[in-house]
Image (spheres, rainbow, N blue to C red):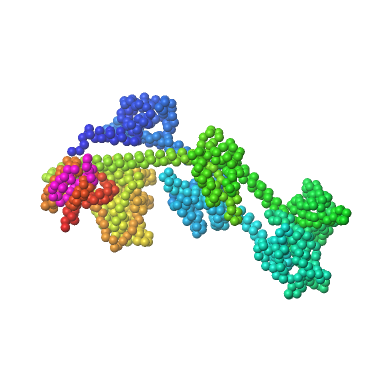
């Protein structure tokens, strides 16, 4: 017997009351509240009174349009749905609150199809809106950050977010939604894919400075060499797993190019000096250390430049030096030694005697003042004047080489005859000051006039000061205007010579163009100023520290946050519970030189509250790898912390609701299948008796609709599992062609009744033995071919097959089903593949159906690596649908024939297939036990019954049964517990699982528990007999 009407009503009321979805039923045109569950009462935030109208229960919505919508639904019978609608509802305290709701108004009808009321389902989505708003604010913060930032999500590293700085950096390319490999194919062989994968897999951040990257800076441009400072920072979800990577990038190309230019200039200068035809020595006058000896000097003196330990005072030459009178000079009298002590040499001539002969040399020297980080330097060029007296040409040549050396050295030499007031300048000085090369002597006033007017008083004061005191050095920087359109910075140094009366008579010195250095210094000052402006404009706290960890700087934001002007007091503002961790990590970073990265709470002065901050710092190192400075930031992440907590809570609620839905559907399936099994089973039994034609037709209607209801339940369960991501697939070898012909044969009777054709065509050869899920493929084929048969009343259906070889024993299988049926308009086609939706209402009225078939078919095909699509243009009339899946094929694998649909002949003939077999039928429902007894006794089996697991264990151990049919879900000791007890007592006969649960995971569970086979209700009698025969044969020795 099935459930009574009263039992059914009680069951529905219990289900509705326990549902987490707000649900209510409004009665009549006045919309009086007839039924509602607790979830709806909670949403209403008030005590509901049954019988009152909606307007009486919710007077605040009277003018919000909802009453009019209810009236329209009641009058027209058309369902109304709305999402994210603002509703002003009274809260518990009586004040109006803004609430955002998703709701559905559905009419319900009586048996005469008359509208009797409205079913209301509503969901509060206010919290979801807040979460979306919070995410938008986070995106806004990132967009305003003046650093190139992008967020990559998932193991495929797909661009989820990037700020304008990052977009500008990559040439404004459209990257959102692309993976890194799709966005930047040009970096495929540069190692960055692997680094990103490693960061995602290990959760360890990665940082690089001045990494060389070949990157396209525009959509159509070619990859160009760039240098980047970047970090790859993984971020994690609430469960601690890495969800993506935050990428920050700073373009360092200009910085690297500038440094390379300076280094190349230095190398170029050394190369030039080494190629000079003049021996040149530079030494430190304070220590005597060689600073530079060019190739000509090494060759001339036989010297080998080693380390800084080489110096003038302990050098042992292999030559002798004499003055022009032939007097041998001591080493300390050598011109180079005197120059190293700071003495200025002017055209001193000496004779160098070596084993190879003697040479005449003219020696000069000059002092280069300390500059650019270098100590004061004596420069000593040696001029070979061996043939001076005999060959004027050689003398001229030597002078030219000396002049070239001076020009290459970029040092201008000058001499001011104070008595005559004339200035004699070197070629390089004349060039710098804008005088012609043949005007080596100029009046002092003309030279002084080239100095910028506003600098002249300062220069004149320095000249006078050095002439009044011989110990007062002349060392000054000023600007000159050698030409009207140019302005240079000059670094001048000089020394005053006095006569016997102490009167200044002569002044000599050097003049060096330092314009480039001055510009560089200005750039540095401007850069520092911009850095401070940038730091002060940032919403984060920016700070700097010395190598020993002493805080030396914080930006304006840091001062405003803490209220302290002393950066060194930072630890006082850290929460007491976080101080030890913050300080220990900071100390560890200082020792290791590794990045500082932690989180702790900082006290905010304005409201005396502690807020969470992400604190990061990177060391800046010199060329030797020594840390010279730390730069860091403190970013307020309190909102992110709170969002993480909210998201975790929302996720838990969603998963809980989904589990409740899955459990509810599974239980409903069991509860419906159990009485349905009895209905279909006893229908088959009655069909086996002597019946009239009308009676047999009526029973066929019951059987056909019962099986249709079973398929509907299976579809609903499958849809639920697909949505929950829990659909299980079983990939096994099977015969594809056998499966397809079996499906086609299923519709043979319908095709013949309609006088239409159903044929199979092969466009390409299709392998027979495939490896996929045959049961799911059969389900797809039955849905698509069944629809074609249903909607075709003349003409026929063609099933066209095609296989594309993908390599590695894999194919993409295409099954194109083309019919000559009613066809689809573009509007109807747009509604396909939507759950519970058909082309239009007329289709449902004429052909029936739930609208689940196409949706489920596509989901199943996607699970098999393909899809189901409506194909336009394939049929002049009717419609065409293509099924595509990807499958392996193996001609050597044994074919696995999927379970075929079982049908019963309904004949009353009996046989003795089960003669001599004793069966124990265990089921808590007497109807099911009685049905099984009827099925088996007509096959001559002996059947005993047990109504629960405990009774089954007792009877099985007491009697000699060949097989046990065990229901899984029973009160008290269920089927699993009973089997466990039997196996513990070494019970060997086969035990078959009987269950109304139709899900694949239930079958796998029974297999893992040790059941010999698995049968699903409603029970097919022929299949039941076959399983008993096979199981008893397998268990016998």
- The quarter in which the C terminus is drawn is bottom left
The percent position of residue 726, horizontal first and vertical second, equals 33, 47
* Residue under the point 80% across and 72% down: 387
Q: Which residues are magenta?
A: 950-977
Relative to 806, is 863 above or below?
above
Residue 953 magenta-highlighted = yes
The percent position of residue 209, horizontal first and vertical second, equals 56, 53
Relative to 373, is 307 above or below?
below
Q: Quadrant of residue 113?
A: top left
- Front-most of 131 and 554? 554
Outermost residue, bottom side: 356
* Residue under the point 30% across and 62% down: 891
The percent position of residue 364, horizontal first and vertical second, equals 78, 63
* Residue under the point 33% across and 33% down: 23
Q: Quadrant of residue 63?
A: top left
* Side of 372 where 762 appears, left or right: left
Residue 934 magenta-highlighted = no
């Amino acid at each position: 017997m099935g459930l009574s009407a009263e039992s059914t009503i009680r069951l529905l009321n219990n289900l509705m009351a326990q549902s987490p979805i707000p649900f209510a039923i409004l009665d009549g045109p006045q919309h009086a509240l007839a039924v509602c569950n607790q979830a709806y009462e909670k949403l209403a935030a008030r005590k509901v009174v049954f019988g009152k109208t909606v307007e009486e229960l919710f007077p605040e919505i009277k003018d919000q349009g909802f009453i009019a919508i209810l009236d329209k639904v009641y009058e027209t019978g058309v369902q109304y749905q709305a999402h994210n609608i603002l509703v002003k509802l009274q809260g518990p305290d009586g004040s109006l609150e803004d609430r955002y709701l998703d709701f559905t108004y559905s009419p319900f009808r009586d048996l005469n199809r008359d509208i009797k009321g409205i079913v209301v389902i509503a969901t509060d989505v206010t919290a979801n809106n807040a979460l979306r708003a919070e995410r938008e604010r986070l995106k806004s913060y990132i967009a305003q950050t003046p650093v190139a930032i992008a967020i990559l999500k998932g193991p495929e590293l797909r661009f989820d977010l990037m700020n304008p700085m990052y977009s500008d950096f990559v040439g404004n390319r459209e990257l959102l939604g692309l993976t890194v490999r799709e966005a930047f194919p040009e970096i495929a062989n540069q190692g960055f894919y692997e680094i990103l994968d490693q960061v995602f897999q290990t959760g360890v951040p990665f940082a690089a400075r001045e990494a060389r990257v070949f990157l396209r800076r525009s959509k159509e441009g070619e990859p160009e060499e760039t240098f980047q400072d970047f970090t790859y920072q993984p971020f994690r979800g609430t469960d601690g797993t890495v969800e993506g990577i935050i990428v920050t990038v700073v373009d360092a190309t200009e910085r690297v190019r500038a440094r390379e230019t300076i280094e190349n200039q230095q190398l170029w200068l050394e190369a030039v000096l080494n190629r000079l035809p003049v021996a040149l020595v530079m030494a430190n006058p304070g220590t005597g250390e060689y600073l530079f000896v060019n190739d000509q000097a090494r060759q001339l003196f036989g010297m080998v430049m080693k380390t800084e330990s080489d110096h003038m005072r302990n050098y042992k030459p292999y030559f002798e030096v004499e003055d022009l009178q032939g007097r041998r000079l001591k080493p300390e009298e050598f011109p180079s030694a005197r120059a190293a002590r700071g003495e200025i040499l002017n055209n001193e001539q000496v004779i160098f005697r070596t084993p190879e002969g003697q040479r005449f040399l003219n020696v000069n020297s000059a002092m280069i003042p300390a500059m650019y980080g270098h100590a004061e330097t004596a420069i000593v060029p040696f001029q070979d004047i061996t043939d001076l007296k005999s060959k004027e040409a050689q003398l001229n040549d030597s002078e030219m080489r000396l002049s070239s050396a001076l020009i290459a050295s970029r040092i201008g030499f000058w001499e001011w005859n104070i008595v005559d007031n004339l200035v004699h300048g070197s070629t390089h000085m004349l060039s710098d000051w804008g005088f012609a090369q043949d005007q080596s002597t100029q009046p002092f006033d003309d030279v002084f006039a080239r100095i910028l007017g506003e600098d002249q008083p300062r220069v004149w004061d320095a000249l006078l000061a050095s002439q009044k005191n011989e110990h007062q050095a002349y060392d000054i920087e000023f600007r000159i205007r050698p030409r009207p359109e140019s302005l240079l910075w000059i670094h001048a140094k000089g020394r005053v010579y006095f006569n016997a009366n102490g009167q200044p008579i002569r002044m000599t010195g050097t003049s060096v163009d330092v314009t480039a250095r001055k510009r560089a210094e200005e750039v540095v000052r401007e850069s520092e100023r911009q850095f401070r402006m940038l730091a002060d404009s940032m919403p984060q706290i920016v700070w700097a520290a010395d190598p020993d960890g002493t805080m030396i700087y914080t930006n304006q934001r840091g001062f405003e946050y803490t209220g302290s002007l002393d950066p060194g007091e930072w630890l006082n503002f850290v929460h007491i519970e976080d101080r030890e961790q913050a300080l220990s990590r900071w100390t560890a970073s200082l020792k290791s030189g590794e990045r500082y990265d932690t989180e702790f709470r900082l006290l905010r002065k304005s409201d005396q509250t502690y807020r969470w901050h992400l604190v990061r710092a990177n060391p800046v190192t010199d060329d030797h790898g020594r840390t010279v400075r730390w730069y860091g930031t403190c970013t307020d992440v309190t909102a992110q912390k709170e969002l993480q907590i909210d998201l975790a809570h929302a996720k838990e609620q969603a998963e809980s609701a989904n589990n409740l839905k899955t459990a509810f559907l599974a239980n409903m399936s069991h509860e419906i299948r159990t009485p349905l099994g009895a209905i279909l089973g006893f229908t088959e039994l009655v069909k086996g008796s002597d019946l009239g034609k009308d009676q047999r037709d009526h029973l066929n209607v019951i059987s056909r609709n019962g099986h249709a209801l079973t398929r509907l339940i299976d579809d609903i369960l499958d849809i639920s599992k697909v949505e929950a991501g829990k659909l299980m697939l079983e990939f096994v070898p099977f015969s594809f062609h056998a499966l397809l012909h079996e499906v086609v044969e299923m519709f043979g009777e319908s095709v013949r009744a309609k006088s239409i054709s159903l044929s199979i065509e092969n466009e390409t050869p299709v392998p027979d033995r495939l490896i996929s899920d045959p049961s799911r493929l059969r389900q797809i084929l039955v849905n698509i071919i069944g629809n074609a048969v249903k909607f075709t009343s003349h003409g026929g259906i063609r099933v066209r097959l095609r296989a594309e070889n993908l390599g590695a024993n894999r194919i993409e299988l295409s099954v194109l089903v083309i019919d000559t049926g009613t066809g689809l308009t573009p509007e109807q086609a747009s509604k396909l593949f939507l759950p519970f939706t058909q082309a239009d209402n007329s289709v449902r009225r004429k052909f029936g159906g739930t609208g689940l078939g196409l949706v489920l078919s596509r989901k199943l095909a996607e699970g098999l690596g393909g899809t189901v699509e409506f194909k336009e243009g394939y049929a002049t009339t009717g419609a065409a649908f293509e099924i595509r899946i990807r499958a392996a094929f193996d001609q050597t694998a044994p074919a696995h024939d999927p379970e075929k649909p079982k049908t019963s002949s309904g004949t009353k003939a009996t046989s003795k297939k089960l003669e001599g077999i004793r069966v124990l039928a265990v089921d808590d429902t007497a109807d099911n036990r009685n049905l099984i007894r009827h099925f088996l006794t007509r096959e001559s089996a002996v059947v005993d019954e047990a109504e629960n697991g405990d009774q089954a264990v007792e009877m099985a151990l007491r009697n000699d049964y060949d097989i046990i049919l065990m229901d899984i879900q029973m009160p008290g000791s269920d089927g699993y517990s009973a089997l466990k007890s039997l196996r513990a007592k070494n019970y060997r006969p086969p035990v078959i699982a009987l269950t109304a649960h139709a899900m694949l995971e239930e079958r796998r569970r029974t297999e893992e528990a040790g059941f010999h086979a698995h049968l699903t209700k409603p029970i097919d009698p022929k299949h039941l007999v076959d399983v008993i025969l096979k199981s008893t044969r397998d268990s016998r020795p």
